[in-house]
Amino acid sequence: FAGFRLAIIQQLVSCVKSDNVRRAWQLVKQAVEQRPDIVVLPECFNFPCGTRLYPKNAEPVPGETSQQLSKMAKECGIYLIGGSILESDRGKLYNTCLVFSPDGKLLVKHRKIHLFDVHIPGKVNVQESKIACPGNSLSMFETPFCKIGLGLCYDLRFAELAQAYTKKGCHLLVYPSTFGMTTGPAHWDILQRGRALDNQVYVATSSLATDNDADYISWGHSAIVNPWGDVVAQAGSEETIVYADIDLQYLADIRQQIPLHSQKRHDLYGEVGEQKH
Ligand SMILES: O=C(O)CCC(=O)C(=O)O
């Protein structure tokens, strides 16, 4: 088996940051019992998602939560994709995903590239860019298993980002997220399956668990999708951990059977992922 095991944590968060970090510790330790190589936390796992609450929960990197994430990775001997925190840096705020290696080293920092500025009358009205600034770079990291590309939530909607990561050799794309109750049921699964099929990669998402009393109610349904487009593991609404074995031989087989990568007509529609970073 040419692969590795992924654990996705779907965490229920409260309004108390320290409680959320403590709970993340418990869930990561619980996940490790199933011997995963990589563990993923959800977007904004340490602070509630109501946008107006963002600034008071911001912190620098390195800072309190990043140090805890580093310790979790090291103590548990895992790659930890630390969902996201609100990062403060020189007076600006970013929605930031931190990734730590099994020896607790910060490997990459993904600042959400596409901010969630969306108005669906009567249903969704979020202007994330009023609070946070966008990141300006792709974020990938190497593991002994494969190269991994990162996005946060709304980044999942941008097919070009996934294509760029694929072009650069990523075989797994991970999107710590938290879709809401309007676009979640409508788009969440299909976006992940789309990214996986277009690029013939594995796609994994982690979400906050549904809390009907929260300011922003999360859809949950964290998932892992294989390069055939099958949802191989999926949570419901509640706090839970889902696992899947990522089979890189299976990915290679699909790419051989349906050779999209050698059949692209870049002469007609250009090529995504050629930008320099
Ligand atoms: O794209 C969506 O529908 C949800 C995105 C979102 O909630 C976010 O980026 O925070």
Image (cartoon, helix red, strand yellow):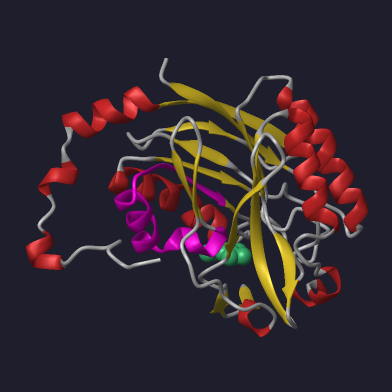
User: Which residue is at 52% across, 69% downward?
Assistant: 113
The quadrant of the rendering that contains the C terminus is bottom left
Q: Where's ligand 1: which quadrant?
A: bottom right
The image shows residue 136, relative to residue 105, as above or below, that is: below
Residue at far top of view: 1
User: Which residue is at 31% across, 40% downward?
Assistant: 200
The quadrant of the rendering that contains the N terminus is top left
Q: Which residues are magenta?
A: 152-175
The image shows residue 40, relative to residue 149, as above or below, that is: above
The image shows residue 262, relative to residue 145, as above or below, that is: below
Closest to the observer, 184 or 255 = 255
Q: Quadrant of residue 76?
A: top right
Q: Judge left or right: residue 215 versus residue 134.
A: right
Q: Judge left or right: residue 215 versus residue 129.
A: right
The image shows residue 54, relative to residue 61, as above or below, that is: below
Q: Judge left or right: residue 266 versus residue 5.
A: left
Q: Quadrant of residue 197?
A: top left
Q: Position of residue 132 (x, y in %)?
A: 66, 77
Q: How many marks?
A: 0
Q: Position of residue 84 (x, y in %)?
A: 68, 57
User: Which residue is at 64% across, 56% downward?
Assistant: 97
Closest to the observer, 215 or 272 = 272
Q: Position of residue 83 (x, y in %)?
A: 67, 51
Residue 160 among magenta residues = yes
Q: Position of residue 226 (x, y in %)?
A: 40, 34
Residue 179 among magenta residues = no
